[in-house]
Image (cartoon, rainbow, N blue to C red):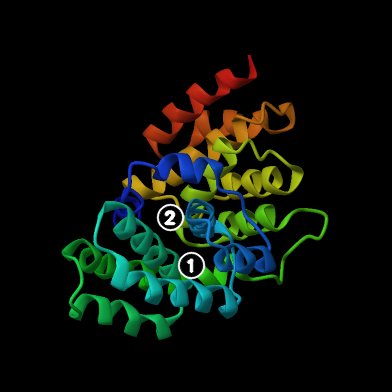
């Protein structure tokens, strides 16, 4: 997760891009990546983090744009664009793109691009596991959006990093629909991945915060139970704080 978070800091404009990034359909992604609007492309690339998009046509177009951008990547702005494309390609989780990253690392490119390509390889390995989980449609509920279903997949998964990132997205985007709240409630009642470890405690703390931030009285008892009975002292402390959301 540290690698992903570090890479997400590649430009000063990133946080505003992620805040503005909205998941799109596969057709919309392809349309954006065919456009000449670099800023719009960066926003689309930022949204791929948790988009659950698996269509190879999307990532093949990203790679095509990357190959065109690399010879032009000589200053801060052009390098930044190529770096975003490298990152977006890594979100595919598709091993075939490893050759592209390795070619950048071995090629006659700016050292920053080589650095981002090395980080992209590590993110690619991460998304080999994550991408199939996020894009799995077997439990999709048609009553809810693609974005909600992808987050639901992440929250149900056995990957703590995905649970953590999904819970943060619920909080930041105020996504308190019945699908996500019910899954958060169920996962918190049966915290089978909770152990005396920082990442596990963080993941469940953010999930509890996501549920409590809904201010839905139906889930208050779950937060109270965590505050009183969780096996982890830090999680009990966090839950006690989150109960205040209901007052």
Q: Quadrant of the C terminus?
A: top right
Left or right, 13 with respect to 43, comes to left
When the figure is inspected, residue 76 is found, relative to residue 172, above or below; the finding is below
Quadrant hosting residue 153: bottom right
Q: Quadrant of the N terminus?
A: bottom left
What residue is shown with label 2? Answer: 161
Where is residue 16? Give x, y as percent.
46, 39
Mark earlier in primary sequence (2, 1): 1
Which sits in the foreground, 139 or 114?
114
Around disc 1, counting alpha carbons within 10 Å, would you say few (fewer than 14), some (14 to 19), or many (20 or more)?
many
**Badge 2 element:** helix
Q: Is residue 247 visible?
A: yes
What residue is shown with label 1? Answer: 130
Quadrant hosting residue 210: top right
Around disc 2, counting alpha carbons within 10 Å, would you say few (fewer than 14), some (14 to 19), or many (20 or more)?
some
Q: Residue placed farthest to the top in the image?
A: 247
Quadrant hosting residue 184: top right
**Disc 2 to disc 1: CB gap under 8 Å:** yes
Which sits in the foreground, 46 or 188?
46
Which sits in the foreground, 185 or 44?
44
When the figure is inspected, residue 59 is found, relative to residue 236, above or below; the finding is below
Tell me what residue is drawn at x 73 percent, y 49 percent: 179
Where is residue 65? Give x, y as percent.
45, 72
Tell me what residue is drawn at x 67 percent, y 26 percent: 215
Q: Is residue 196 visible?
A: no
């Amino acid at each position: 997760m540290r690698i992903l978070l570090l890479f997400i800091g590649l430009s000063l404009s990133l946080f505003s891009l992620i805040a503005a990034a909205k998941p799109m359909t596969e057709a919309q992604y392809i349309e954006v990546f065919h456009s000449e609007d670099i800023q719009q492309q960066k926003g689309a690339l930022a949204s791929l983090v948790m988009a659950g998009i698996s269509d190879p046509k999307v990532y093949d177009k990203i790679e095509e744009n990357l190959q065109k951008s690399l010879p032009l990547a000589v200053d801060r702005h052009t390098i930044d664009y190529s770096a975003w494309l490298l990152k977006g390609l890594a979100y595919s989780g598709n091993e075939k793109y490893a050759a592209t990253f390795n070619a950048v690392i071995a090629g006659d490119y700016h050292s920053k691009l080589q650095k981002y390509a090395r980080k992209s390889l590590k993110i690619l390995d991460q998304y080999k596991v994550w991408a199939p989980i996020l894009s799995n449609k077997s439990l999709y509920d048609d009553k809810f959006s693609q974005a909600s279903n992808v987050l639901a997949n992440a929250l149900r998964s056995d990957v703590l990093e995905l649970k953590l990132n999904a819970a943060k997205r619920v909080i930041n985007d105020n996504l308190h629909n019945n699908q996500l709240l019910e899954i958060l409630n169920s996962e918190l009642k049966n915290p089978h991945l909770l152990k005396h470890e920082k990442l596990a405690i963080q993941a469940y703390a953010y999930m509890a915060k996501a549920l409590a931030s809904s201010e839905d009285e139906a889930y208050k008892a779950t937060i109270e139970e965590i505050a009183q009975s969780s096996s982890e002292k830090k999680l009990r402390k966090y839950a006690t704080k989150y109960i205040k959301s209901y007052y």
